[in-house]
Image (cartoon, rainbow, N blue to C red):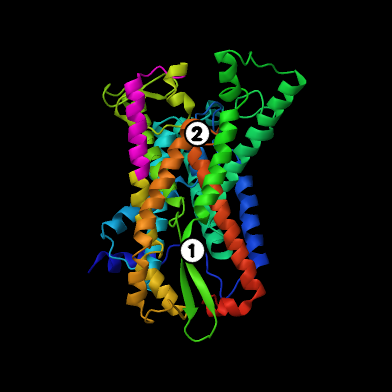
Amino acid sequence: MGWKEAAEPVLTRMPSVTRPEGHVPFRRKLGWTAGILVLYFFLTNVTLFGLATGSEDFFGQFRSILAGSQGSILQLGIGPIVTASIVLQLLGGADLLGLDTSDPRDQILYQGLQKLLVVVMICLTGLPMVFAGNFLPADPAVAQSLGVGSNGVKTLIFAQIAVGGILILFMDEVVSKWGVGSGVGLFIIAGVSQQLVAGLFSWEALGRTSGFFPTWFGIITGSAELPSLLTAEGLQALFLGQGQILALITTLLIFGIVVYAESVRVEIPLSHARVKGARGRFPVKLIYASVLPMILVRALQANIQFLGRILNTQLGSLPAWLGQYNSNGQVTGGLFYFLAPIQSRADWMWFLGLTSNEPWEIMLRILVDLTFMIIGGAIFAIFWVETTGMGPESTARQIQNSGMQIPGFRRNPQVIEKVMERYIPQVTVIGGALVGLLAVMANMLGTIGQVSGTGLLLTVSITYKLYEEIAEEQLMEMHPMMRQMFGGGN
């Protein structure tokens, strides 16, 4: 008996959100999406009971990618979901699962396995965070008042973040089945948008005296002063410091490049086999796999750094070649330093005195980050395309089932697949590598609101795709016959 037969009784009974029967009206989809978004913001403001003040947010540098909020019930954010996806994609890529996601039975097993892995990842991330890393310390006053001791309060804290991790899993599923887009993308947009708006308009934003517009209002009115622009100090303050000119330029460039890259596509003409004159196009975009595989790459880096911090905390200190940490818990040398992603200008601008590391160490770290993101982006993009039914074979089957065909070619799935193989694999690799390169460059230059370059990249691309999906939904609402033609139900 194979593993599928043995695990089927458990995996098929995993709780899940029921799929809608038939077509869900666009307004109802918007309602579900807005409702989940409001619930997400509410949960990020529900603080953990029993948590001591001054808790450290290890995921701070990855927070815009993993969503969630430090010290809240959504402490883990989408981290467990993303990590479970990494494991499944690696297992699927190595063909160790033996699951065909186009088969309804295997699809149910895959979804059940994913939920089970999410629960496992909640434990593997949450338990060390609470009990080993001291990232979520227990409040002694609460322990004394409850009479359960420090470990009792820590158990209570873990239970809360575990509930939050499971809630965000089902919130993602509600959006995917009943709403617009995906919950993972929605939560990333929500978190990054908060940081971006704060970085632009807040009078006290993210540890700075004020955001971009209040700062320049102060400079123009004379209430805030910059050093003379004729000096190096003044130019540094204008572009890298208070003025945030470089951050603004980088932010606008990311918006422009991502929107342009999303519009670059190869359009394969289609015609309907039975409806004369009905034509369409299948777009193979430059960023075909979307930017979501970048979440997987960054989450893998986050988990590596998390492991290093836990080992350093538990062992007191690591061997110098493995990792060196300062009093703030930041890695400053060793293998874990070179594997840490570049997060801001302070990580590499040694010539301005922003970091004390040697130039060769910084250059090696940049090279490792570029290699990790470009190669990792291409690999995860391939896995993403294959596991989400976007590969040549699945796409050919979808086109065939919709009644469409490529003009000038026989109406045969194998023929359509061969045409798709000319474009999809190459574009997938190029798009994944390009997004990885853009993410590293954006992180190096910095953005408004101290949003990570990867986070901003994800937000712009996900928002663009959300806009396209909303436009498509509205078109289907206006023309129900199109929905029936393309297999959208009644």
Locate the C terminus by quadrant: bottom right
Q: CA distance from mark 1 to mark 2?
A: 31 Å
Q: Tell whether position 365 is magenta.
A: yes
**Residue 306, position as x, y percentages in the image:** 38, 35
- Report whether residue 121 is seen: no
Label 2: how many Cα within 10 Å (few below 14, some 14–19, many 20+)? few
The residue sitting at 54% across, 52% down in the picture is 462
Residue denoted by label 2: 60
Q: Amino acid at mark 2?
A: Gly
Q: What segment is highlighted magenta in the picture?
A: 354-374
The answer to whether residue 118 is above or below residue 454 is below
Identity of the amino acid at label 1?
Answer: Ser
Image check: 459 left or right of 317? right
Taking depth in this image into account, of 443 and 183 the one nearest to the observer is: 443
Give the number of the mark in front: 1 or 2.
2
Q: Is residue 277 magenta?
A: no
Q: Is residue 55 left or right of residue 11?
A: right
Residue most extreme to the left: 1
**440 over 324 or under it: above or below:** below
The main secondary structure of the magenta stretch is: helix
In primary-sequence order, the first of circles 1 and 2 is: 1
Q: Which mark is residue 16?
A: 1
Residue 203 placement (x, y as % from top left): 70, 28
Looking at the rendered image, the quarter that the N terminus falls into is bottom left
State whether residue 27 is above or below residue 50.
Answer: below
Tell me residue 141's x, y (percent). Answer: 56, 27
